[in-house]
Amino acid sequence: MPRRARLVLPNIPLHIIQRGNNRQACFFTDEDYSIYLDWLAEHASKTGFQVHAYVLMTNHVHLLISADGVEAPGLLMKALGQRYVQYVNRTYRRSGTLWEGRFRSCLIQDEIYLLACQRYIELNPVRAGMVAHPAEYRWSSYRANALGEVDALVKPHSLYEMLGLDAAARQAAYRALFRHELEPPLMDEIRRATNGNFILGNERFAVQVSSAIGKRVIPGKPGRPRKTLEPESDKLFQE
């Protein structure tokens, strides 16, 4: 069965997940996380995209980006992935693949889902039971978006900028969004769209994207049985 073509449009936010092969660890020390983020920033500059939110988990990565060109996400993940695999194999004297094949992604209707997707990403360590609050987790964009911590990688989206008249007001409004957990149906919606490489948006957005790229952008109607992802029970596997 042919792989679904990835949905990408210029300057439309894209949620990306890159998992470790067989859900194995991708990061082993603090230095590994730091090197990945340094190279992510470097390739962001080279390929022309902005990172609005991110989290590096033990065995997978979430990114929320906006790209100037449709080729940028693929170029980014290929260059960054290959470079990081070479580093891990050399450092830990291993061989073979590190990542689970192609990354998964979904286009996001920003005015409805962008801030929800940012919360979904930055709450990942909390859902995994690794920390009690996202501010306690070092390897995410939460401290930059919510507390104003300097992070050269993070480029706020225009919707984030509209949260307040100045940085302090925006950060306070953003922190307020985390007073309540994301509703399970919303989390399921984000997961289905990202795992299936569909859009995350309403019917109007679906029509607009489909018209722009000439491809199906939402799941087909029920018919033949479809293989579904098994639920993940291990706390480190939470997404």
Image (cartoon, helix red, strand yellow):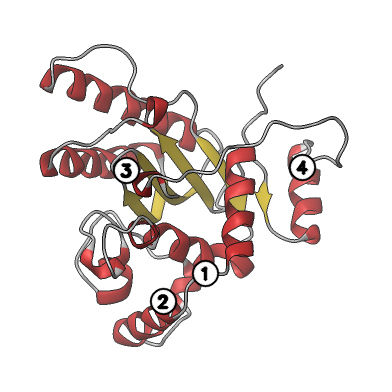
Indicate the position of residue 13 as horizontal and vertical percent values: 54, 53
Of residues 46 and 200, the one nearer the viewer is: 200
Relative side of 173 to 196, left or right: left
Q: Are marks 3 and 1 in contact (CB under 8 Å)?
A: no
* Res 79 → quadrant: top left
Q: Which mark is residue 182?
A: 1
| Label 4 or label 3, whichever comes before in sequence order | 3
Residue at point 31%, 37% (across, down)? 43
Indicate the amino acid at tag 1.
Leu
Indicate the amino acid at tag 4.
Pro
Query: Badge 3 local density, few (<14 within 10 Å), some, or many (20+)?
Result: few
Residue identified by numbered label 3: 45
Marks counted in the figure total 4
Residue identified by numbered label 2: 178
Residue identified by numbered label 4: 219
Relative side of 119 to 125, left or right: right
On screen, 43 above or below 127?
A: above
Indicate the position of residue 222 as horizontal and vertical percent values: 86, 40
